[in-house]
Image (cartoon, helix red, strand yellow):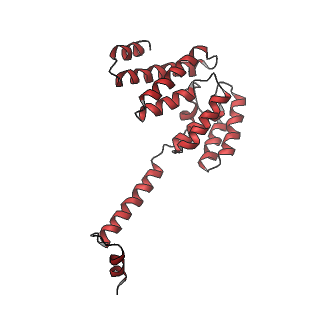
């Protein structure tokens, strides 16, 4: 008895071997593309909203990205800490790590880094903005609204980098207007956008 005949007795189905091979190749191709679908992490992506010129003077950030890309998050963290010591206008280290995890598709590690960042930097609204953006993208309007409201409450008292603060205002008001739009509260949505 042939192997394929035995297999058909064990798993009765109408699929041919060719159809199964084609399906497995399609799944393999999808997995390969998914691995490359994540964005290439750049210095501008990480700190562009905090500094005016994220150029070559941020060698520590570049090295952190290289370490992270080589699956060395602890090494990346050390270089991010060195960069923050040199320029205190940069975002907190765990926030930068969270951005790297998000860009690499590791949402569980990103969430852990965001939680740590929020605990260690309770006046920084960016963890709430990032989570709000993720919630609105996932269609979780109630969670997004609460996160944007929390961020807006923190923005008023934020004493850090003015460039980051302006970015926070834009992101929080835009996010809150998306929440209002989903609820068809057009007056609220336009009021938030008009304040920008």
Q: Residue 52 appears at what percent x and percent y?
A: 57, 24
Residue toward you, 168 or 3: 3
Seen as rendered, the residue at the extreme left is: 14
Classify residue 78 by image quadrant: top right
Residue 29 versus residue 136 in the image, above or below = below
Q: Residue 110 appears at what percent x and percent y?
A: 57, 39
Q: Residue 81 appears at what percent x and percent y?
A: 70, 35
Residue toward you, 44 or 32: 32
Q: Is residue 195 at all visible to an observer of this figure?
A: yes
Q: Residue 11 appears at what percent x and percent y?
A: 35, 72
Asked whether, in this view, residue 56 is left or right of residue 39, the answer is right
Give the residue at x 46% y 19%: 173
Classify residue 193 by image quadrant: top left
Give the residue at x 58% y 18%: 154
Q: Quadrant of the C terminus?
A: top left
Residue 169 versus residue 18 in the image, above or below = above
Give the residue at x 36% y 15%: 190
Asked whether, in this view, residue 147 is left or right of residue 141, the answer is right
Residue toward you, 79 or 148: 148
Asked whether, in this view, residue 129 is left or right of residue 177, the answer is right
Give the residue at x 40% y 20%: 177
Residue 64 versus residue 177 in the image, above or below = below
Q: Is residue 57 at all visible to an observer of this figure?
A: no
Q: Quadrant of the N terminus?
A: bottom left
Question: How many dots with numbers?
Answer: 0
Residue toward you, 70 or 140: 140
């Amino acid at each position: 008895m042939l192997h394929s005949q035995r297999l058909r007795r064990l798993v009765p189905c109408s699929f041919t071997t060719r159809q199964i091979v084609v399906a497995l190749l399609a799944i393999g191709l999808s997995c390969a593309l998914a691995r490359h679908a994540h964005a290439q992490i750049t210095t501008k992506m990480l700190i562009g909203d905090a500094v005016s010129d994220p150029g070559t003077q941020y060698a520590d950030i570049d090295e952190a990205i290289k370490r992270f890309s080589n699956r060395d998050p602890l090494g990346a963290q050390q270089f991010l800490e060195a960069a923050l010591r040199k320029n205190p206008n940069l975002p907190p280290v765990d926030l930068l790590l969270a951005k790297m995890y998000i860009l690499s598709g590791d949402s569980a590690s990103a969430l852990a880094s965001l939680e740590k960042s929020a605990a260690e930097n309770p006046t920084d609204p960016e963890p709430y903005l990032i989570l709000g953006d993720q919630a609105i993208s996932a269609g979780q309007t109630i969670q997004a609204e609460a996160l944007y409201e929390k961020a807006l409450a923190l923005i008023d008292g934020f004493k850090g980098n003015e460039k980051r603060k302006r970015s926070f205002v834009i992101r929080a008001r835009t996010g809150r207007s998306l929440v209002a739009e989903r609820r068809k509260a057009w007056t609220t949505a336009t009021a938030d956008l008009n304040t920008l």
